[in-house]
Image: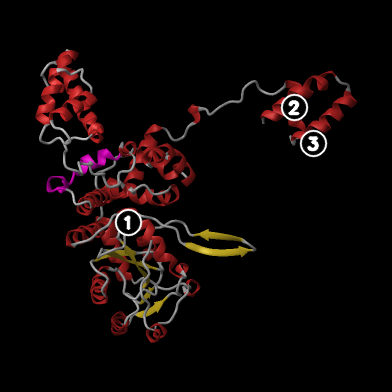
């Protein structure tokens, strides 16, 4: 536009002073170069471009600060999901929070919130989001005969299965190293609805895996019909195969080295497990219990208040792939809207959804994350005691939580320990004597003090200890300067005396 404005300024005088034929010729050339409509070009050449282009007009803003503040609270209550998913969740979240007395919106603000598009939501919380943001070990393979007994299912074989066919994977919480024993998460994702269940595995053992799977079957709102895994030896063994045969569960596996065959559960490994648990190393009974407590809250928050995308169709045009997705929906909504879901399951889900408080779930999840971090970092008992905040206090904190940056305890890095002395103190026996010499003459240098010490104790304190003594004298000089300025009082008392 700036170039077009310059072109208008260069042509306008010739256009005004020219005759009819010349004006027609100038106008034809100007339209061909600028691409303007002919009538618009005539007006510009007669009147000229505006001196300054108008900026945004605040008086025409539809969504004011009150709407934006309410949107930030909803965004925090949804665990900071994207605008497209939040657009679908806002009606559910507003109704649930108002039902539990956490939110009181006027009719005007409520109408505007429900009318906001996904792109507008992203623009409204862009600044807040910017401020807030701040190797796998190879396993042994199963025997050939056993692998042949388990049929392969690829990503294209999932047509439109009923609820109950799941993909399963393990997520290792080994931290930076895979040595020793560590906890792993068993992640189970339903193909039809995206319903996700997670449970900790204390060790990689097939019998323990079957027991954990039995507990997860009790939590699922539908019957487990299919069990699709990768080629990990903890899955491909006689124990799990016989367990599925006895329970009437169809047991399948993906192709080796083809992670896309398990795209549904692989996506949840990052969006649910890693996002909520993080990358710390977890080991021991205490960490397993803390992780189990965290997952008991996560399953309700994710499956009832976390919308997700689901691929509707995919087209390939040469090297270009076009994907179309269904509207974002929670796993509960997909189960409720699936005609293959039994009526009893729908009634049970509706009853549970009516009693859930998203803010309470989020508060419990944050507290469980703090306990898990305290256990993983092995904090002292006084620091690891985590107190659960009051719900009103937690709700009020959602308004300003974005200013603190990342608030998930599991996403924050482990605090570095203070470096302490690693070698014995070479001046341990003469520290009192050195300090006395320094008090006699604070102007003395470290080299002079070391020379005096060498004369008193020959061949005991070499010149290589000069740097160590310099660091010691630096601390003494700082204390001496503070004493000369403020006296013998403490720093806080001296500062208060000066300011008063």
Residue 348: which quarter of the image?
bottom left
Q: Secondary structure at mark 3?
A: helix
User: In this rendering, would 334 be left or right of 295?
Assistant: right
Q: Which of the two discs, 2 and 3, labels the residue nearer the N terminus?
A: 2
Residue 391 in magenta? yes
Secondary structure at badge 1 equals loop
| Disc 2 from disc 3: Cα separation | 12 Å
Mark 3 Cα-neighbour bin, 10 Å: few <14, some 14–19, many ≥20: few
Residue placed at 53% from the left, 59% from the top? 324
Tag on residue 9? none
Q: Dot 2: what SS?
A: helix
Q: Is 320 a magenta residue?
A: no
Which region of the structure is painted magenta?
Answer: 380-399
For the question of whether residue 124 can be seen, the reply is yes
Residue 231 sits in which quadrant?
A: bottom left
Which disc number belongs to residue 32? 3
Q: Which residue is mark 1?
A: 176
Whole-percent x, y for residue 327 in the image: 46, 57
């Amino acid at each position: 536009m700036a170039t077009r404005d310059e072109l208008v300024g260069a042509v306008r005088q010739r256009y005004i002073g020219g005759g009819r034929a010349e004006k027609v010729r100038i106008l034809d050339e100007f339209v061909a170069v600028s691409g303007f409509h002919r009538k618009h070009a005539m007006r510009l050449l007669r009147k000229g471009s505006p001196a300054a282009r108008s900026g945004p007009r605040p008086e025409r803003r539809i969504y004011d600060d009150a709407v934006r503040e309410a949107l930030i609270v909803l965004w925090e209550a949804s665990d900071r999901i994207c605008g497209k998913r939040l657009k679908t969740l806002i009606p559910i979240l507003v109704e649930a929070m108002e039902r539990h007395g956490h939110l009181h919106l006027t009719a005007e603000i409520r109408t505007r919130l429900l009318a906001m598009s996904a792109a507008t939501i992203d623009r409204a919380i862009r600044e807040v989001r910017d401020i807030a943001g701040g190797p796998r070990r190879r396993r042994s393979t199963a025997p050939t005969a056993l692998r042949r007994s388990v049929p392969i299912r690829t990503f294209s074989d999932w047509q439109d299965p009923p609820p109950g066919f799941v993909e399963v994977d393990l997520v290792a919480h080994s931290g930076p190293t895979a040595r020793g024993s560590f906890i792993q998460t068993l992640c189970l994702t339903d193909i039809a609805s995206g319903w996700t269940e997670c449970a900790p595995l204390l060790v990689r053992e097939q019998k323990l895996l079957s027991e954990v799977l039995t507990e997860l079957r009790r939590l699922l709102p539908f019957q487990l019909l299919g069990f699709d895994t990768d080629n990990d030896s903890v899955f491909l063994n006689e124990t799990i195969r016989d367990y599925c045969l006895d329970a009437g569960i169809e047991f399948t596996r993906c192709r080796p080295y083809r992670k896309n065959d398990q795209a549904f559960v692989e996506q949840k490994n990052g969006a649910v497990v890693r996002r909520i648990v993080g990358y710390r190393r977890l080991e021991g009974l205490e960490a397993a219990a803390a992780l189990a407590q965290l997952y008991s809250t996560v399953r309700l928050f994710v499956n009832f208040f976390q919308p997700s995308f689901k691929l509707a169709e995919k087209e390939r045009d040469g090297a270009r792939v076009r994907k179309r997705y269904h509207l974002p929906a929670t796993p509960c909504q997909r189960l409720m809207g699936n005609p293959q879901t039994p009526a009893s399951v729908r009634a049970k889900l509706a009853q549970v959804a009516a009693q859930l408080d998203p803010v309470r779930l989020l508060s419990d999840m944050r507290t469980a994350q703090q306990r898990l971090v305290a256990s993983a970092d092995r904090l002292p008992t006084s620091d690891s005691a985590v107190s659960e905040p009051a719900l009103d206090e937690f709700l009020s904190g959602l308004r300003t939580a974005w200013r603190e940056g990342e608030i998930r305890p599991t996403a924050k890095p482990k605090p570095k320990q203070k470096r302490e002395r690693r070698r014995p103190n070479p001046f341990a026996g003469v520290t009192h004597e050195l300090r006395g010499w320094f008090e006699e003459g604070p102007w003395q240098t470290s080299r002079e003090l070391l020379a005096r010490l060498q004369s008193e104790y020959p061949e005991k304190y070499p010149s290589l200890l000069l740097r160590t003594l310099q660091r010691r004298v630096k601390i003494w000089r700082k204390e001496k300067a503070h004493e000369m300025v403020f006296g013998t009082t403490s720093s806080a008392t001296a500062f208060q005396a000066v300011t008063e």
